[in-house]
Amino acid sequence: MNGQPLSIFQISGRAMSAQLVRLNTTASNLANAGTVASTPGEAYRPIKPVFRTHFDDASVGVATVDVEQVVTAGAEPKKRYDPGNPLADADGNVWESGVDESAELIDMMETARNYQNNVEVLQTAKDLILKTIRMGS
């Protein structure tokens, strides 16, 4: 990375940033669930972050995570017959986003737990530092 060992604060901070990107993509997917378009190309497609593990060159066995990119992933849009919809094509079809709301909600809960775990790591590290300082006084 930069020649200096990563601190626990840097490791947890990066993990929290990655989980925040994950939460934002999940929120975007949920916000677009059920939306329709006139063509499959215009229909919303779910997005997911791609994480990459980065090993610390200065410390053996220490790693953190970064978001490498956000990609389109998940089910293809579904054709639905809805001739009364103003977005319907000449055959009366609309294309609905392929967002699986149940899977997105599960992903959101998992993301929140991972984020909270990193908050607890930071709190524990802070408490240990403060206890160490108090021992010296």
Image (cartoon, rainbow, N blue to C red):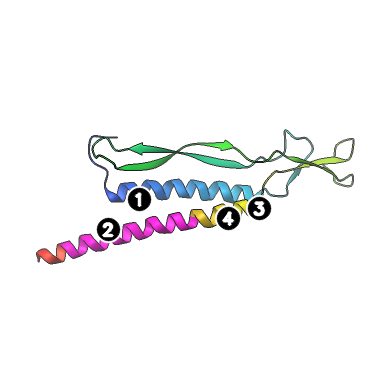
> In the drawing, does residue 80 fall left or right of residue 105?
right
Which span of residues is magenta-colored? 112-132
- Identify the residue at image location x=23%, y=61%: 128
Residue 125 disc label: 2
Quarter of the image where the C terminus is located: bottom left
Q: Main secondary structure of the magenta part?
A: helix
* Residue 121 figure quarter: bottom left
Q: Earlier in the sequence, mark 1 or mark 4?
A: 1
Q: Earlier in the sequence, mark 4 or mark 3?
A: 3
Tell me residue 60's x, y (percent).
25, 39
Q: Nearer the viewer, residue 58 or 22?
A: 58
Residue 52 disc label: none
Q: Nearer the viewer, mark 1 or mark 4?
A: 4
Q: CA distance from mark 3 to mark 1?
A: 29 Å
Q: Determine which residue is flagged by label 1.
A: 12
Q: Secondary structure at mark 3?
A: helix
Q: Determine which residue is flagged by label 4.
A: 106
Q: Earlier in the sequence, mark 2 or mark 4?
A: 4
Q: Nearer the viewer, residue 84 or 12?
A: 12
Label 3 amino acid? Glu
Q: Residue furthest front?
A: 61
- Identify the residue at image location x=73%, y=49%: 34
Q: CA distance from mark 1 to mark 2?
A: 10 Å
Q: Residues within 10 Å of mark 3 (few under 14, many from 20)?
A: some
Q: Nearer the viewer, residue 108 or 86?
A: 108
Q: Pointers 1 and 2 in contact (CB under 8 A)?
A: yes
Q: Determine which residue is flagged by label 3.
A: 101
Q: Residue furthest left?
A: 137
